[in-house]
Amino acid sequence: MSAATTLTPAAGGQFTAGAPGIPFGRLLRVELRKLFDTRAARVLVILMVIGVLAVNIISVIVGRGEPQSLDAFIQGSFIPLGFLLPIIAIMSVTGEWSQRSALTTFMWEPRRARVLAAKFVAALIVALLGFVAVAASSALSLGIAGLTGSELDWNINEAIVAGSLIMLVTYVAQGIAFGAAVHNTAGALILFAMLPTAVSLLTALVPFLRDIREWIDINVASSPISVGEFGGSNVTHFLVSALLWIGLPAAIGVWRTLNREVK
Amino acid sequence: MITVENVIKRYGTQAALADVSFTAQAGRVTGFLGPNGAGKSTAMRIICGLAKPDSGRALIGGVPLTQVHNPAQKVGALLDASAQHDGRTGYESLLLSAIAMDVPRKRVDETLELVGLTPKETKRRVGAYSLGMRQRLGIANALLGGPSILILDEPVNGLDPSGIRWMRDLLRGFAADGGTVLLSSHLLLEIEAVADDIVVIGNGRIVAQGDKHSLLKGAQTHARATDMLALDAAVRAAGFTAEPGKAGELTTNASAEQVGRAALEHGIILTALSEGSAGALEDLFFGLTQDSSREGTPNPAGSHAGGTGAGTWPQSSTISSATGEGASK
């Protein structure tokens, strides 16, 4: 066969003109879209909107006539966001394997680590947009609360808001990492929801673990952060536990994603 | 142009591909033929960069796919029609590809129309699609970027007869325009109908490859006569092989002319005489892959190999029992 003769540089040049794969920006656009273009993701977004609306409406009704603060609205609205956004993040990673769309995705971009990175950045962008939306809806709700005769506190406690935002980002990162490590939606969701609680239980029961719980138990380590208490060794504890709960599954996840055969 | 060089791939101790090398040339349709589990899909996944070979390499236009710029736009692949997100609409699935490959949105509509999916169908979730519709969507995805190489794993599965005809014309036209097509199938006649070159794989090894006509030229001649015993003796006397073929025919390595001459010489009345032609590839396929197929291949020639000829010739009913022997082997 004339295999060797047709293997001219020109033929290769057609394929290598330009960097390998596709630009990150395009990958990011696709991954942003993919977060919301499936039926399951749309259901979760609707639940998220309903959740935020419910928190705001209930707060306005229950607190009518009493003093209300913007902080409280923002903190309350973060709860449905922090609960459901990580699920969307998990599904964006596990869906590639359980729905086998990885077959298409890794043909667009064979450098799989970049695909994971795009999914993380996409989820992060959504988390930030979610924060902006929550802030806006909280301000609106507080205005409405004013109409019911509540005394309004428009001051923002930056530390509390920053703490909530850090927790949201942490949950999203944890979701992506768990999804990348487990590759199975149900499995990743269960681990994501149960493993921290299981570890909390262990650290409460085992004396040796109880001594280091603020380092290894993300629930313990994050509770001061979530309310904006960054003093003492709180940040160090939080960073170490985040390394354990995000860094470790992320490392496993990147390794598995790079090495698993796509079928 | 696709080049696979000395690829070895093991799963545990099982060698899925044992030193596989072949090429698919530009301007030609290369049929990739083999029984289930022979290694076709594994080889295609390796070409597409979705699986790593233990050794050897697969190149697209001289480079590994991982080094290709915008690979999905240049290499259209359909490896599994069911590997699409059930929760997305058909249109959305293609639109994602269009964004990723940076092709204009109107290509999405054009390509969906080309594969015969109606706008109404493309607005439905892929989960509600039949296999044939998924296959069409997958083909649309492969064609979307206007690639110069197509890699299709069993693309006619689930297509109706008109769909199969359409696919055949599409692939022929694609190759005629200078494209490279690598097409796997276990449907022998499909490969015979569309391929220019054929690569036969069995048990992880390439057992034959080359131009379809030269591969089939060495194939056998089939003959039938009123007196099969006499024909068998005559062909053997002329120095050729003679074995019971399918449908009560005698299969020989002699040419049709040589069989005709032998029959004339012995005054035998021939009732059928054919060379290669339909089914030739099937013979080649079963002959080459019989050691590697899952259930001892129904291969009359094999089951009677070395048979003493005279005495085993039938009245046509034994052929089915010969096939039965083969299958129960």
Image (tube, rainbow, N blue to C red):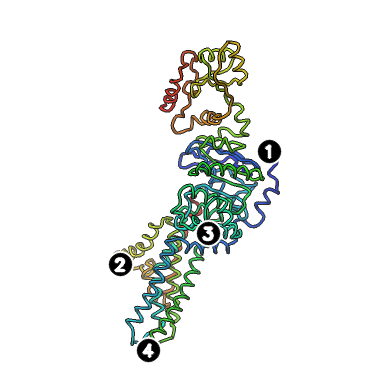
**What chain is tagged by disc 2?**
A
Question: Which residue is identified by label 2?
Answer: A204
Specify which label sits upstream in the sequence, 4 or 1: 1
Looking at numbered disc 3 in the image, what kind of residue is underneath it? Val
Mark 2: which amino acid?
Ala
Circle 3 packing at 10 Å, graded few (<14), some (14-19), many (20+), is many
Number of numbered tags placed on the structure image: 4
Task: Give the mark toward the camera: 2 or 1.
Answer: 1
Residue A262 to residue A176: above or below = above
Say which label, 4 or 2, has the lower sequence index. 4
Q: Tell me the residue that label 3 is attached to.
A: A115
Residue B169 can be seen, yes or no: yes
Q: Which residue is mark 4?
A: A151
Q: Residues within 10 Å of mark 1 (few under 14, many from 20)?
A: few
- Of residues B292 and A178, the one nearer the viewer is B292
Of residues B68 and B300, the one drawn nearer to the viewer in this rendering:
B300
| Disc 4 element | loop
Q: Quadrant of the C terminus of chain B?
A: top left
* Inter-mark Cα distance, 2 to 3: 38 Å
Q: Position of residue A243 (x, y in %)?
A: 44, 65
Q: Which mark is residue A181?
A: none
Q: Are marks 2 and 3 in contact (CB under 8 Å)?
A: no
The numbered mark 1 sits on a residue in which chain?
A
The spot of residue A185 in percent (x, y) is 40, 57
Residue labelled with disc 1: A2
Secondary structure of the residue carrying numbered label 2: helix
User: Viewed as shown, does residue B211 lie left or right of A174?
Assistant: right
Amino acid type at circle 4 is Glu
Is B181 left or right of A225, judged from the image as shown? right
